[in-house]
Image (cartoon, rainbow, N blue to C red):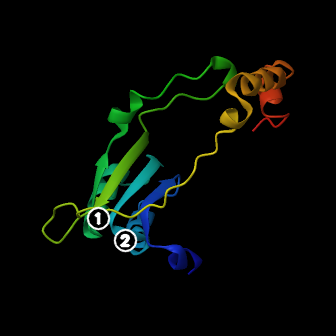
Amino acid sequence: DLVLADGPFDLLLASDVLYEHHLVSKFFRSAKMLTTAAAEVLLAVELRPCGVDLSEAIVSEAKKCGFEAVDVTRKLKMWVTPMPPELKIPPLEERHRIFVATKQSADGLPQPVEPVPVAKRKSHQPWKDLGEKEWYQRSLHFWSKQDATDAGVLDGHLE
């Protein structure tokens, strides 16, 4: 109820929320309630053995709820940078997938996007207040005192 009170939303991001195929239809029914007519859903999943092809289930269940879901993993993989080996982050595997789902109108076409007025915001640029040279000297001074490991950068928090 609290989420519905803040919605509807133009963008829904979800990762690691679909562990079994029976959750797919529930997910897209909820996404339909939470999103605007022109919303996009970005869904990251790990294809786990669950008795059905989860990628096919995502596409078909999305369609039943008025979304068109497309697997965009291959398009996005070219933008993934390799991680330094010392971080011990496992590489993306074929089972890691990313889908983009867009709402469809009754005629099967994407919903037209209506422009939303956005209030102008003044960006915070402290280097302009202090002067770029002073700002970058302060930054250099701070980082030169830090331990050049994940413990130093993350202030001792290894997560």
For badge 2, the amino acid type reads Lys
Q: Is residue 124 left or right of residue 29?
A: right
Q: Does residue 99 sit above or below 108 in this rendering?
A: above
Residue 14 image offset from top left, x and y in percent: 49, 55
Which is nearer the N-term, disc 1 or disc 2? 2
Q: Nearer the viewer, mark 1 or mark 2?
A: 1
Residue 138 image offset from top left, x and y in percent: 80, 26
CA neighbours of label 2 inside 10 A, class few (<14), some (14 to 19), many (20+): some
**Which quadrant is the N terminus positioned in?**
bottom right
For badge 1, the amino acid type reads Glu
Residue 48 visible in rendering: no
Query: Could you tell me if the residues under marks 1 and 2 are in contact, i.e. CB atoms within 8 Å?
Result: no
Which structural element holds mark 2? helix
Query: Which residue occupies the foreground of this view, 96 or 103?
Result: 103
Residue appearing at x 48%, y 61% in the figure? 119
Residue 132 image offset from top left, x and y in percent: 68, 26
**Which quadrant is the C terminus positioned in?**
top right
Label 1 sits on residue: 114
Residue appearing at x 33%, y 56% in the figure? 101
Q: Does residue 77 sit above or below 17 in this rendering?
A: above
Label 2 sits on residue: 32
Q: CA distance from mark 1 to mark 2?
A: 18 Å
CA neighbours of label 1 inside 10 A, class few (<14), some (14 to 19), many (20+): few
Residue 29 visible in rendering: yes
Which structural element holds mark 1? loop
Residue 31 found in image quarter: bottom left
Q: Is residue 94 left or right of residue 4?
A: left
